[in-house]
Amino acid sequence: MADENSLGAILRAQGVSRRGFLKFCGAMAALMALPPSMVPVIAAALDKAPRPSVIWLSFQECTGCTESLTRSHTPTLEALIFDAISLDYHHTLQAASGEAAEAARAKAMKDFFGKYLLVVDGSIPLKDGGVYSTIAGMSNLDMLQEAAKGAAAIVAVGTCAAFGGIPHANPNPTGAVAVSDIIKDKPIINVPGCPPIPVVITGVLAHYLTFGALPELDGLGRPKMFYGESIHDRCYRRPFYDQGKFAKTFDDEGARNGWCLFELGCKGPTTFNACATTKWNQGTSFPIESGHGCLGCSEPNFWDAGSFYKALSVPITPVGKAAAIAAAAGIAGGAAIAIHNRHVKAAAKTGHQTVTANDLEK
Amino acid sequence: MSTNAAALLHEIAALLDSLARTGEGGSVQLNGLPLLPGDYEVLQEELGEGELSAELEALGRTQLRETALHGVWWVTHRNSVHEIVAESIEVTRCPAILQTPAEDVTESARLLRERLQATSKTGDRNG
Amino acid sequence: MSDMDLLLWARGPGLQIALAIFIGGMLIKLFEIFSLGRSKDLSVPRPGNAAAGWKTIVIRSIPKPVLMKRTLPTYIMGYTFHIGFFVALLFLAPHIQLFRRTVGLGWPALPGQLVDGISLVAILALLLMLPYRLYHPVKRFLSTFDDHASWALALAPLLSGYLAFHHLLLPYTLMLAVHILSVELLLVFMPFTKLVHSMTLFISRWYNGDALGHKGARL
């Protein structure tokens, strides 16, 4: 019999039937690309999982990641997991509570020290002592370091928290960095995207709840089950890429026929995310399906990776100036060498001593 | 028929063979696949609609329909605002979610007993 | 440095540096060649050969039966590699995009799978060239470090491009970075190795043709 504080008991108390719970677990299994045989395992684990304490810290961000998740007026299956977790602190959602919210955060960190899950969105500015982003008078840097001490694991949600994101882009006036640039002694899961697909975030949490461990991560700390393949690998327009059928402009014949968007700047080949399979808005569509190339938003430095509308094979910085300077230097250098060579030839000519057969015999 | 739809049908055929021989089928998730426009409709046409369909109202409506091919079920899970959250083709004699969970049976046995005991008490009064 | 950082460097500063060294180097070589020039031939030129230099530039691209008989493998492998290399460089769609955006010129592309097949044949020709060079006594005797380095510098972009196109060996982002870096390496070393023949072949064919025409020899 499940403990009354377990996820299963809480869901049932909210009126979710066992079949409803199984439907939820089935959707989670599909999301994590697990076989149907895993559904009972997931159901059993989630049923008994203790309600985890989650502290959500929002730093230098646009709130797009939180928005992506908390469609509280349109409840979805993936939002369910957030109803089930004990969201002990989220300063945007709890903004009206003011100091009471800060007190709740302090209490949760104390009561669940070593066990709570820390979710971070937004980058952390470091310049000038971190004054460019503060909450209740405390800099983001200090708040992160304090909260990380008692965290079991940290989930860096969104490209800002995972890689620095838009504040980190050239010229990075606030000295923004990623969570992993500051915290080095705790397990960190990066869930990048600008924003990430909502169901990817809940899938990562579901995995953590089901298996009590972090999912397998790639070289950039992203869960392989969602970031293991590139958009290009799973894109439905691949046959057009392979046949060399590219749209040349938006709304030309090729674009209307759904041809590949490589020449219009699609970064699909170098971008790893679940957009092409899991898609957005409950599987409705994703950028390429809507006719716009992938921006590469789940990769580091995508804002500084050249135009969104120039192909991957095009340089990201203009080469004209470098070429012109090199040409000028080459001409100048060449001219100097030519003059030198002329001198050497002229000197050789004047210094040439004619020899007769008589000289040789001597 | 595009290669995507054809490949899917081959996979379903293989699962049906397995179900027939060993009693173990499987399922194919539709929402994760790169389907070309039209593939979905081709698949629906090829599989057709069978004699049995069931609706489950839990966290939104789920529709389970056996296709014209016995043992091949088309399952569509929707949420409370009618958006599709998961869609799959299950090859099975009966999708697991249709069966009543054992714990629910225990609970409803207990519930009915309690209700009968309560009515019998009031029933005594009315004779 | 992540794979993406490497790719962005290759597509950014890397290309600027490589292109600068390539242009500067080639121009200096040009000045060196023309300023040194050659000594005047004071003999009377044989008549009717004024355009011998220009003609030779074109004629030497056509195989000569006499030479083919003496060194057929070199001819076949050489032509296969060179033609394949230029088809891959000039007729693959992503490369045409690169030219369109940097130089301003574009042209129609060939189907990707056709270019892919031609590139594979070019790679095979190049791979066969090395053992032949080491086995043939004369070629082995004549080969220097420059020859082997030039071979490697030409192979790297073709091979890495093929691997990237097929998503083989390394994760795609890294494979693409390696491909672009191999091209940049080729650009950097081209003016300073035998690969400079890509520019100087026109000059040497002209000089040789002009000298032969002056003497009245067969071109």
Image (cartoon, rainbow, N blue to C red):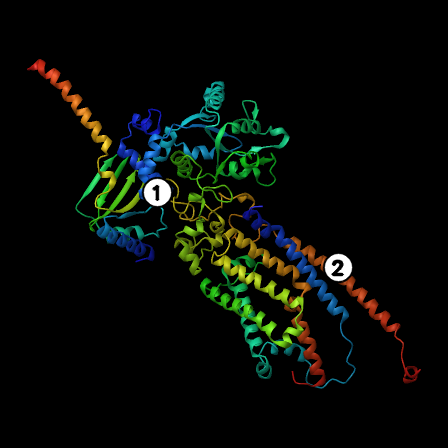
Query: Which residue does the image show at 12% across and 16% down from the upper left?
Result: B121
- How far from the left and from the top, in percent, is residue C158? 54, 63
Furthest residue toward top: B125
Q: Chain of mark 2?
A: A
- Kind of element beneath mark 1: helix
Furthest residue toward left: B127
The local crowd at label 1, few if under 14, some if 14 to 19, many if 20 or more residues have their Cα within 10 Å, is many
- How far from the left and from the top, in percent, is residue A8? 32, 29
- One can see residue A26 in this view: no
In the picture, residue A93 is in which quadrant? top left
The answer to whether C128 appears left or right of A128 in the picture is: left
Q: Which mark is residue A48?
A: none
Q: Nearer the viewer, residue C184 or C70?
A: C70
- One can see residue B110 in this view: yes
Image quadrant occupied by the N terminus of chain A: top left
- Kind of element beneath mark 2: helix
Q: Earlier in the sequence, mark 2 or mark 1?
A: 1
Nearest to the eye among marks 2 and 1: give it: 1
The answer to whether A42 appears left or right of C93 in the picture is: left
Q: Nearer the viewer, residue A189 or A202?
A: A189
Same chain shared by disc 2 and disc 1:
yes
Q: Chain of mark 1?
A: A
Q: Nearer the viewer, residue A183 or C84?
A: A183
Q: CA distance from mark 2 to mark 1?
A: 66 Å
Q: Which mark is residue A30?
A: 1
- Three-letter amino acid code of the residue under disc 2: Ala
**Number of numbered tags placed on the structure image:** 2
Q: Which mark is residue A332?
A: 2
Query: Which residue does the image show at 57% across and 47% down from the upper left?
Result: C5
Residues at discs 2 and 1 in contact (Cβ within 8 Å):
no
Q: Nearer the viewer, residue C146 or A327?
A: C146
- How far from the left and from the top, in percent, is residue A213? 43, 36
